[in-house]
Image (cartoon, rainbow, N blue to C red):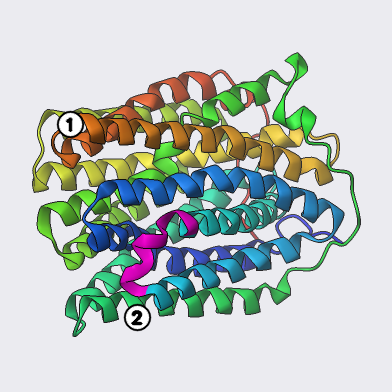
Amino acid sequence: MGVRPESKAWLVLLLNALYTVADLLCAAFVGVYFYVGKMDVRIVCYHYLALYLVTPLFFLLAGWYSQARDRVHVYRLGLALHAMYYGLLLSLGYRAPDHAVALGALLGVTWGFYWAGTNTFNYDVTTARSREYFFGVLSVITGVSGLIAPLISGCIIGFSPSTESGYRAVFLAAVLLYLLAIACSIGIPHDRQPRPYRLKRALFPGRDQRDWQLIMVAAATQAGLIHMFTFLLALLMYMETGSALSVGFFAALQGLASIASSYWTGRCLRPHNRKRFMFWGTVILMTAGLLITAKFSILTLVLFGFLRSIAAPLITIPCSGIRLNVIDQCAEESAQRIEYIAAWEVPLAGGRVLTLLLLLVLLAVFPQPVLAIRAVMCFICTQYALNYLLMSRVSIANGKDSTAPDPVS
């Protein structure tokens, strides 16, 4: 039996919270960890390039397994692989950069299974009218985690007897949180009914799926805001200060801004004003891109992180709600939702790969890696003008699908 919409929403939010805390304890520091080991930004790029290349392949595989067997297995395997990934970082220590590509590929497998499972749960426990509220709450959880987790990590690493022991403590904490999430997932009921996995229509939408075509193209322009800024900003801060503690404080400041923006967006967003939120989020993000390009200092870096954190919920919350509501319309039955969720990851990964390849090219062209990273960050920001143009043309973006959001129960 599947999860009844909204009946398990708070359990799914709890699982998201445990994952988010574990992820944000480490997310800002993994790239720094690889950079410290070799003092080479390209090593960090190779790690994430492997991650982005592998993720969609295993996302599609996980989607098939969830249809043929059980989505709960997919979710728990994703959590277990996360624990394995950080366990390997623990055991390898400063030898980890020598295995950056292999570790990135493992994390890609991990992401594929985890996100296939959790995105399915997020879909199942919400309705068309409650999604903005649900993703608003989820974004607040992410913001709170982003405020507390990296600050704790920065303090642990900064005040440990040695940097290595600090990283080991942080990675161990992440492993324990992933194991706790596995234990809590026992409340998610299994769904073992075999179903067909018809991916072609979702991956290659026809003219009768105009809204989904727009969302698939827009996915390629959403790559940077969803993940890449996390490690790029952490790298820049560490390269400027040489301090893990400063990276933690910087990430905490971004988390504080994200909490306020997420709360306000979740409270005020309605189907009829989605375009307005996406527009102003795009304007703020592009302003941040111009700021970081025109002048670079610790102050402009902090301002960029602040503006980016305000803009992200304004864009991602309505985009997430629109995407899932379009899936509601396109899927012939609710069981097909995983096919569309998995298909969306392909152009998203494509955008990430192209952006990282651009960064590698710029690292070879510019004399200083900071210049290359700043140029790519500006590129990511300007992409969101195209994202807005595409997403605003989706019929659901104009509030035609529902009235006001219901609270999560």
Residue 101 lies within the magenta run: yes
**Disc 2 secondary structure class:** helix
The vertical placement of 96 against 254, above or below, is below
Q: Which residue is identified by label 1?
A: 366
Magenta region includes residue 311:
no
Residue 75 visible in the snapshot: yes
Q: Secondary structure at mark 1?
A: loop
Q: Which tag is nearer the camera, tag 1 or tag 2? A: 1
Instruction: Estimate the x, y position of residue 191 in percent, counting from the top left.
Output: 84, 61
What type is the residue that disc 2 sits on?
A: Ala
Q: Earlier in the sequence, mark 1 or mark 2?
A: 2
Foreground residue among 177 and 128 = 177
The structure residue drawn at horizontal position 68% and vertical position 32%, both measured from the top left corner, is: 326
- Furthest toward the bottom, the residue is 161
**Quadrant of residue 121 within the rendered picture:** bottom right
On the image, the x and y values in percent for residue 181 come to 58, 74
User: Can you see residue 284?
Assistant: no
Left or right for 402, reference 221: right
Q: Is residue 399 above or below residue 192?
A: above
Q: Position of residue 199 (x, y in %)?
A: 78, 36
Screen quadrant of the C terminus: bottom right
Q: Is residue 204 above or below residue 185?
A: above
Numbered label attached to residue 118? none
- Disc 2: which residue: 169
Q: Quadrant of the N terminus?
A: bottom right
Magenta residues (range): 93-102
